Structures are given as C-alpha cells and as structure tokens.
Amino acid sequence: MKMTRISVLCGILMFMAGAVWAADGTITSISVTPASPKVNESIHVTVQGTGPVPGKKCQIVLVLGDGSPMTQKGVISSFPYTFDTHYDKSGTFTMLVFSGANLYGTCTGEAQAVVKVKAKLDAGVAKKVLKADPCPPGWHKKSYDPVYDAFTCVPNMPRPKIQCPPHTAYFETECTVGCQAIPY
C-alpha cells in the first residue's frame, strides 16, 4: 500500500515538474489583410495559436521588418488574437510575431508573413495623370492601371501608311513601321 502511494506521489510530482517547464501556449500562424497594402494603410493582423492554459497568458511581440523597433501588441489569454498596424514606407518586408516570457506565463512559437507595401501616389500627381495625356508628342497612352496609376505609351503610327517599293510589304508593330522584303 505504501508503495502505491509513493508511486502516485512521484507521478504527480513528475507531472507538475513537466507542467512548469512546458509552454503555456504556442503561436502557430499569422495572416495579414491586405497582403499588399499601400503606405500608411491599415493592416489587419490575426495571430493563431494553441492555449494558453487556463490562468496563463501569452505576450505577443511584433517586428514589422522595416527597421522600426519591435513592439508589444498585447498580453492575451486566448487565440486568435487580432490587431491593426501599418507601414510608413514602401518595400517588401517580413513581418514576425513571437511570444516573449512575461509575468503571466511562458509561450513559444513564432510566425511570419511577407508584406509587399506599395508606394502611395500623391493625389495631386494622380489627378494630373488622369486629366492630361502623360505621353510625349507623337505618342499615345496604350494602357492604364488605376491601382498603381501606371501607364504605357506607344508611338503614333503614320497615316496614311508608308508606300513600299516593289518586292516589299508594309509592316507595323507597337513601336515600329517599315517595309520588309518579301521572299521569292
């Protein structure tokens, strides 16, 4: 009978020792919306994980990856955890979240997401591009992307078409006109 009680007590002590060293929660993944925001646009971040165990909490730390200092985003008692942030400059950055030790418990894990931040076009510049043809004389706008305010210019083709000499044929591409030889 004494042997059984000792075995049970040893088992409980071993379980408690393991619980002290085990993580109270684990970060497993992160999602970012939108994945390609513009500079200073609000980004919604969702951190997924397991735990923490009842009565314990995880500290969430954020690294934007753009050279700015890391920041504590919260001490949480359950996942998912969401918060908003933004980038002050354009570029491709690796956002990282991890949990640091805190007074409430110890969590583990980290997750990262690649965020492609687009430059925010000055509204005054965008209006000028939209109102006037931005292409030089003798050229015209072929395409326009309103998301990036990007465009492509191509040369105007001569009208009427060029008269080609015998044994040649007129040809025209986006950037070239001419007479090419006709093989016999």
Image (cartoon, rainbow, N blue to C red):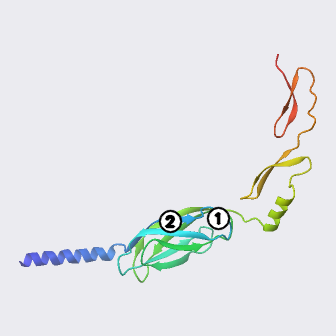
Q: Which residue is mark 1?
A: 37
* Number of numbered discs visible in the structure rendering: 2
- The N terminus - image quarter: bottom left
Q: CA distance from mark 1 to mark 2?
A: 16 Å
- The C terminus - image quarter: top right
Q: Nearer the viewer, residue 55 or 3?
A: 55
Residue for point 49% across, 69% down: 47
Residue for point 30% across, 75% down: 19
In terms of image quadrants, where is residue 123?
bottom right
Q: Nearer the viewer, residue 38 or 19?
A: 38
Q: Position of residue 81 (x, y in %)?
A: 48, 73
Residue for point 85% across, 62% down: 128
Q: Position of residue 11 (x, y in %)?
A: 19, 74
Amino acid identity at mark 2: Ile
When the figure is inspected, residue 51 is found, relative to residue 129, above or below; the finding is: below
SS state under label 2 = strand
Q: Residue furthest bottom?
A: 103
Residue for point 15% across, 76% down: 8
Whether residue 50 sits left or right of residue 45 in the image: it is left
Q: Which residue is mark 2?
A: 30
